[in-house]
Image (tube, grey):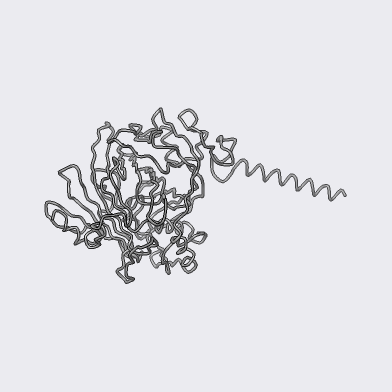
Amino acid sequence: MVIGESMKRITCIIAICLTACIYMHGTAAGENPEQDGAVGRSIPPGTVITMANWQQYRGFMPDGMAALFEGKYFWKMPPDVHIEIGPTVIRPLPKNYLAATERYAPAVRVIELPNGGLTLTNYRGGIPFPNPAEPHKGWKTLANIWYRYIPYLAVETYGAGCAIDSTRNYNCQAYSWVKRQLSYNTDPNAPVETASPNARYFTEWFMELEPEQERYTAYLTVNYADPTRPEEQYAFLPALRRYQPISTLARCAETGGMDATSEDFHNGFDSNITELNVEYVAHRKIIALIDPQLPTAPFPADVDMPLGWPTPKWGRWQVRDVDEVAIKKIPARAGSYCYGRRVMYADSHFASPLWEEMDDKHLKPWKMMALFPLKVAIPGVGDVNTAPFENEVFWDIQRNHASFNADPSLGRPYYINEQAPREYHDDSRYTTPAGLNMIMR
C-alpha cells in the first residue's frame, strides 16, 4: 500500500510538472491564453488590436509586424491603427486539385543534387507533399508553396502601384498583366502543355500603362516544368521596338522604382527551388487580412499613412495557421541571391505567403512584405483565396522606402480562365518572347 501511494504521488508530481512546462513554454511565444488575452490559443472574433493593447497579441504577429508596432524602424504603425479580428474562414481547395494530390502525391520523391540542392520527381499536379515531414521538411513545405493552386489564366487589366520615400513624396504607376499556368493544370477545361524537356510551368507577362513615358515597357518571365532549369526573363523596350533577354545578374534589380525584385514576383516568391536551403521554423498562428475590400479611390485614399497600413474599411482580419520557413541559397549559389535570408509565413491551408521578412547578405533586416489575398470566384471551381490577385506592401527599413500594389485597382475588370476575352488566350502573344514584339503593333 505504501509503495502504491508513493507511485500515485510521483505520477501526480510528474503530471503537474508537465502541465507547468506546457503552460510556461507553449508551442510559440504568445500562445498562452492568459498571456495574450486569447481563448483556446486563438483570438476571439470582435477583438480590436490597437497601440494600447497590441503586446497582448504579439504572439500572433510575424516578427516584422511586431517590430512595426514597437517602432524599431523608420516605418512605424500609425497611432490610430485599428485591427478588428473576425472569424477564420477556410474555403475548400478545388476538388480537381485535391484529386490530383490523392492520385500523384504518393509517388513524389525528393532527389538530392550533387551541388547540395534538392529537386523532386514524379510530380504531376496537386500538392506534392500533403504532410511534409523530415527529412527536408522545410524544402517540402516550400515545394507545396511553389506548386500551390492557381488558375490556368489570370488577367489584370489595370493594376496600380505607388512608391513612397522618407519625405512622404510618392509616385505611382499603372500596369496590366497576364499570368498563365501551362503545366499541371487541374481546372476544368484547362489546356494541357505537351510533356517535353521544354515544357513550361508558368509564365508572367507584364506591361506598363502609366506614366506615359514608360508606357509599353513590358516583361516576360518563363518558368519551366523541370525545376532545375533556370527561369528566363525578357524585356520589351519601346525605344527599340523589340525584346531582348534580361541577364540573370539583373534578378536583384528593383523594378520600376518599386521595392520588388524578380525574386519577389509570382505573388511573393519566384526563385529556383532546387538551389535553396529551407529550414522549417514553426507551425504557428498569425493574424492576416484575407478577403480585403480594396480602396476604390487612388492612393493614398483608404490607407493609413505614412505606413500605408489597411484601414478598417478593408475588412476584418483572421487568425490563420501558417508554416514559417527560413530560406537561403545553397552555398554554391549564394552569390546570385538577392537576400541573405527570406523568412516566409505561408498559409497552411492554401499555401500562399501572407507575410515575409528579408535580410541582406550580412543577415541584417532589410525589407518586409505584407500580402493581402483576395477572394476570387473561379469558373467551375468556386471561391478561392489563392488566385493571383492581392494587395502587396513592401517596407525597405534600410533605405526608408516603401511601395504599395493593388491588383485589381479602382474597380477595373479582371478575368479568370474562360472569363478572359479571346485575345488573352493567345499563347504565342502572352507566353513567348516573340509575342513581346507584337506590342505597339
Q: Position of residue 226 (x, y in %)?
A: 35, 66
At 17% from the left and 50% from the top, the residue drawn is 216
Farthest bottom residue?
Answer: 196
Check the image and report above or below for 85 versus 234: above
Q: Quadrant of residue 328?
A: bottom left
- Name the one closer to the observer, 426 or 422: 422
Q: Position of residue 153 (x, y in %)?
A: 32, 57
- Name the one closer to the observer, 291 or 413: 413
Horizontally, is 52 left or right of 400 in the view? right
Check the image and report above or below for 381 versus 89: below
Tell how many labels.
0
Horizontally, is 281 left or right of 311 in the view? right
At 67% from the left and 46% from the top, the residue drawn is 18
Q: Quadrant of residue 424?
A: bottom left
Q: Position of residue 76 (x, y in %)?
A: 38, 33
Horizontally, is 438 left or right of 155 in the view? left
